[in-house]
Image (cartoon, coloured by chain):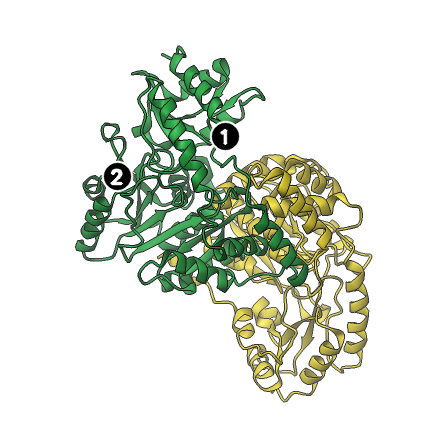
Chain colours: A green, B yellow
């Protein structure tokens, strides 16, 4: 067996989900509850009847890649050759870390609270992971100075999710400016940034900075899972400078050959219709307003989400987040995700998703607020 | 950059394909020219309108996994928990090698002529690759004694494709019996076999052995790409003992999360309809008969394929296979794949696929037979 497997902790999210009952209020979900736009599925099925289901190029359908590149229009990365289509954004992340880093010398810096896969992929590849925690005192805001202070001479990649899972935090324009200026000023081998934009379409604040728009050593990652309720379609992508994109494509070819042709047809139909990628964002905006109202009345301390569909709520002082989540599911029939899943800085908190109907969210939150957890 | 990338040769198949013109006779194709069975695509699209497009479990839909396990009914591997659904058989191969082998000590043995990805995946993972060539004198037949003789104390995995790409060779019942007996007699840590069955539905001989049916330390790999003309669907799977399947599923989860829910719905519809997975085999049997007739009249030396949709033909003595393939595409407008792509033992040969219309195959073969290649 590959000895690296034994070094990786099993998923707490999965363990909690396994305790879910049919009656449970599920605030642990990491995927939309909306239905996907069926017209795009039907269009892809019709195309298949004409064109069959052959491989695309390893990097994906050229027209789809051009549509994606043009939509974001990142400087120096606005053409088809800058885009590689992957089997979901998970493979995009995997391939990016595997391609870019030399496990013998390079380190990755993860900014916590963070989606746990960032660190686990690095561990699987034998890459040294360092982390820097954004403090609860600022609601886990991205702090460029703290990030820069955590760099070591070996850091070759920083992973930033914005909007972030779990906090819903978005990196501000000022933080992007300050971070990219500091990185460019370092000299020597560049530090790359893996800019996880999977929740980008679900951004609710005006002051959202974009690393990919500002910094040339960026690999932006995105996909249709969250914006279009297509988690099961497995369509993600990388946007990067062309020479790196060629390397990413090679690794992607060895790992999975190519992404689903059917999924790419759905994606092309979505990207070809103006507004289709952001159509469902309206529902999330409405839901967020309702969620904030419930939160304000709950007496709980929480981080107002700038984006995504999660909210982090603070447990009573001294409460262990895993113990609390276990009691909540066992005794109160509410599924949540313990903060420690996302790093030490979120210990003492829970991540709740708010894609469930608002009445279920309200009831779940009431149970959390009144539960005897300490 | 990951320094392993630089150690892997770029794909010759890709380089040849890039020279293809609209007028070219393409005998280089690695995928079916048939259309997929549209009824299964339509069924999956209808299901999506009811159920949306959520993630499946990491290992895939339980019902699909049960259908697959039951269809092959390998001893000790006949339940859903023995199956992990992957993004095509490429990811199945990737995850199997990555999970099973410790790059610091384990070696993989590749039996040539071999599909080049076997060795390239191992190189990407830093795993030592040894190869053993089956000789041209027997038409590259699988020889159990030669395979066993090539094992070293460090060999932990043997990769065998049957039917094989490129030769179309199937491992015989006698060879399976003799190989598995020798492996079981070794004692110590078991040697695993990666049994690549991707062309299994396209088998044309009665004497086809099955390693997975005979040997407990087997990971069988398959998918719907070739049997159902669904290369672009990216649905493959592993069948393995349950404890290993759990580990494979973990690695699969970190690499890609899960396979396409849409693709899994198509797969479940196919596996649920008796005969649907072997429906297209009839066309290949008819085509093979016509191909063999053309080959018999060609004056060329060839390996009669037991399975798959390729045939290897010998070049005039002393001909370099890459130089010949380049001249054939440049001067004779025929795309082929040079034998050296599949290992030294196939140098001096070409791989031709016979999924093109029979008249095109006949014309292509005539050009190869009459070309001035030396």
Residue shown at 62%/48% (left/top)? B263
In this figure, what is the number of numbered marks?
2
For mark 2, what is the residue?
A142
Which disc number belongs to residue A14?
1
Tag 2 secondary structure: loop
Residue B16 is left or right of residue B311, and the answer is left
Horizontal relation, residue A194 to residue A273: left or right: left
Asked if labels 1 and 2 touch by Cβ distance under 8 angstroms, the answer is no
Of labels 2 and 1, earlier in sequence is 1
Is residue B343 visible in the rendered image? The answer is no
Q: Position of residue A70 (x, y in %)?
A: 40, 60
Locate residue A320, reporting x and y percent.
Answer: 36, 19
Q: Are marks 2 and 1 on the same chain?
A: yes
Q: Residue at x 77, y 77 (%)?
A: B295
Q: As rendered, which of A64 and B185 lies closer to the eye? A: A64
* Chain of the residue under label 2: A
Quarter of the image with the N terminus of chain B in it:
bottom left
x and y, in percent, of residue B240 in the image: 64, 41
Q: Residue furthest bottom?
A: B372
Camera-near label (2 vs 1) is 2
Residue B73: x %, y % from top left: 74, 41
């Amino acid at each position: 067996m590959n000895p690296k497997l034994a070094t990786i902790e099993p998923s707490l999210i999965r363990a909690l989900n396994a305790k879910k009952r049919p009656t449970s209020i599920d605030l642990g979900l990491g995927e939309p509850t909306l239905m996907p736009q069926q017209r795009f599925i039907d269009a892809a099925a019709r195309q298949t009847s004409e064109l069959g289901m052959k491989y695309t190029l390893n990097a994906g359908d050229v027209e789809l890649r051009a549509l994606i590149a043009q939509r974001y229009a990142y400087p120096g990365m606005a053409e088809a050759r800058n885009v590689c289509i992957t089997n979901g954004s998970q493979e995009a992340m995997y391939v990016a870390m595997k391609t870019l880093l030399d496990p013998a010398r390079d380190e990755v810096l993860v900014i916590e609270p963070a989606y746990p896969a960032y660190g686990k992929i690095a561990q699987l590849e034998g890459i040294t992971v360092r982390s820097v925690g954004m403090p609860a005192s600022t609601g886990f805001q991205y702090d460029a100075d703290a990030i820069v202070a955590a760099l070591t001479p070996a850091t070759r990649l920083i992973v930033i999710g914005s909007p972030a899972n779990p906090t819903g935090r978005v990196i501000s324009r000022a933080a992007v400016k300050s971070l990219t200026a500091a990185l460019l000023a370092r000299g020597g081998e560049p530090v790359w940034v893996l800019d996880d934009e999977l929740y980008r379409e679900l951004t609710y604040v005006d002051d959202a900075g974009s690393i990919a728009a500002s910094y040339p050593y960026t690999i932006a990652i995105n996909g249709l899972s969250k914006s279009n309720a297509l988690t099961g379609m497995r369509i993600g992508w990388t946007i990067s400078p062309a020479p790196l994109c060629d390397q990413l494509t090679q690794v992607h070819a060895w790992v999975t050959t190519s992404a689903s042709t059917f999924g790419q047809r759905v994606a092309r139909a979505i990207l070809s219709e103006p507004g289709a990628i952001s159509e469902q964002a309206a529902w999330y905006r409405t839901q967020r307003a309702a969620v904030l109202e419930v939160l304000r009345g709950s007496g709980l301390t929480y981080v107002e989400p700038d984006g995504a569909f999660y909210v982090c709520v603070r447990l009573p002082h001294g409460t262990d987040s895993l113990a609390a989540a276990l009691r909540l599911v066992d005794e109160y029939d509410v599924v949540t995700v313990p903060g420690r899943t996302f790093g030490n800085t979120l210990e003492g908190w829970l991540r709740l998703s708010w894609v469930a109907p608002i009445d279920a969210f309200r009831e779940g939150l009431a149970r959390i607020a009144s539960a005897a957890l300490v």
